[in-house]
Image (cartoon, rainbow, N blue to C red):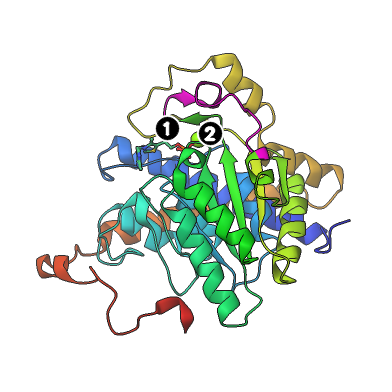
Amino acid sequence: MSSTPITKETYLEWYKSMLLMRKFEEKTGQLYGQQKIRGFCHLYIGQEAVVAGTMSVLKPEDSLITAYRDHAHAIAKGVSPAACMAEMYGKATGCSKGKGGSMHFFSKEHKFMGGHGIVGGQIPLGAGIAFAEKYNGTDNVNVCYMGDGAVRQGAFNETLNMAMLWKLPVIFVCENNGYAMGTSVQRTTNMQEIYKMGLGFDMPSAPVDGMDVVAVHNAMDEAVRRARAGEGPTFLEIRTYRYKGHSMSDPAKYRTKEELEEYKGRDPLLACRAAIVENNYADDAWFAAQEAEVKQVVDEAVKFAEESPYPRAEEIYEDVYVQEDYPFILD
Ligand SMILES: Cc1ncc(C[n+]2csc(CCOP(=O)(O)OP(=O)(O)O)c2C)c(N)n1
Ligand SMILES: [Mg+2]
């Protein structure tokens, strides 16, 4: 039984937030095709239940940190779609002042700690944030996301060891979408069940169905409860799937259409919608209203990005190092 109850409002919020993630990403893909957005860009379509099921158990003071597939995490954490879109346009109004791009969203205000392009680089940082929370005596937790490719990095093992030794309030979430660029999990390891990597550190670890937002919520709820109680970290392998290629330049020829269709048949948005209808939580008019509202939010984000100025050339030397407000997560 989950200690954060799942109510009608939870379902409606899940649907709304996943719809926004999906529509924002679809628009991002279109704009990339029009060369309005350039550089590296990785879409999250298909994986939405992982972030939605996390957010329903967190409080605003908790922090998230993830890799470069970061649009949904930032938006769910409260960073405005407009600031995210402007960031991808390289505009000064972007959440990283237009200097980070798609991979490097950041918002100290919303405790969204990035957006990191170095595979696995965010794993020790997430534990460090959790260390700071513990040191400061808060009950805040950090949720540290990584891909199935990132668990092959040495830093993953070092971090799990220290996080467990110091009982840090961090939830390590491996978003196992089956592939690291074009390399399948099967081709990188003889041990296919990634969650078992946590067991070597005696860390509570579990596999979770990442196409099912309820399963994600329940697993996260248990992990967050443990972290807040001072009982230390958890490692969740959340099994999910990305519908698009790794990045915008990937035609995804390394997988079969059948595999893709199988996952699309378990689409998290459609499943959530079906549950809402089944429980009579909302009617067709409500779904139509959500579509319209989300379309407006995304359109406004694009307009904001289009109309915003580029950063001044001299700004390239600013914000390179943290200066007067260091250490920034301790205030
Ligand atoms: C240290 C490092 N090595 C290699 C790369 C190139 N690279 C970018 S993404 C990626 C695959 C990572 O896959 P995964 O962790 O499964 O995340 P996903 O893209 O599936 O979300 C690689 C190897 C990198 N960015 N950083
Ligand atoms: Mg992957």
> In screen coordinates, is 26 left or right of 165?
left
For the point 59% across and 24% down, the residue is: 190
* Disc 2 element: loop
How would you rate the neighbour count of disc 1 (Cα within 10 Å): few for under 14, some for 14-19, many for 20 or more? some
> In screen coordinates, is 19 left or right of 53?
left
Amino acid at circle 1? His
Residue 6 image-quadrant placement? bottom right
Q: Is residue 89 above or below residue 309?
A: above
Would you say residue 295 is visible in this rendering? no
How would you rate the neighbour count of disc 2 (Cα within 10 Å): few for under 14, some for 14-19, many for 20 or more? many
* Front one among 327 and 72: 327
Amino acid at circle 2? Arg
For the point 50% across and 29% down, the residue is: 179
Q: CA distance from mark 2 to mark 1?
A: 8 Å
Tell me whether the residue at label 2 lies in contact with that at label 1, contact meaning CB atoms closer than 8 angstroms: yes
- Decide if ligand 1 comes within 8 Å of the CB at mark 1: yes
Residue bearing the label numbered 1: 246
Q: Is residue 165 above or below residue 266?
A: below
Q: Main secondary structure of the magenta part?
A: loop
Q: Position of residue 177 (x, y in %)?
A: 56, 34
Residue 7 magenta: no
Q: Which residues are magenta?
A: 181-196
Residue bearing the label numbered 2: 242
Q: Position of residue 12 (x, y in %)?
A: 72, 55
Residue 327 image-quadrant placement? bottom left
- Decide if ligand 1 comes within 8 Å of the CB at mark 2: yes
Residue 238 image-quadrant placement? top right
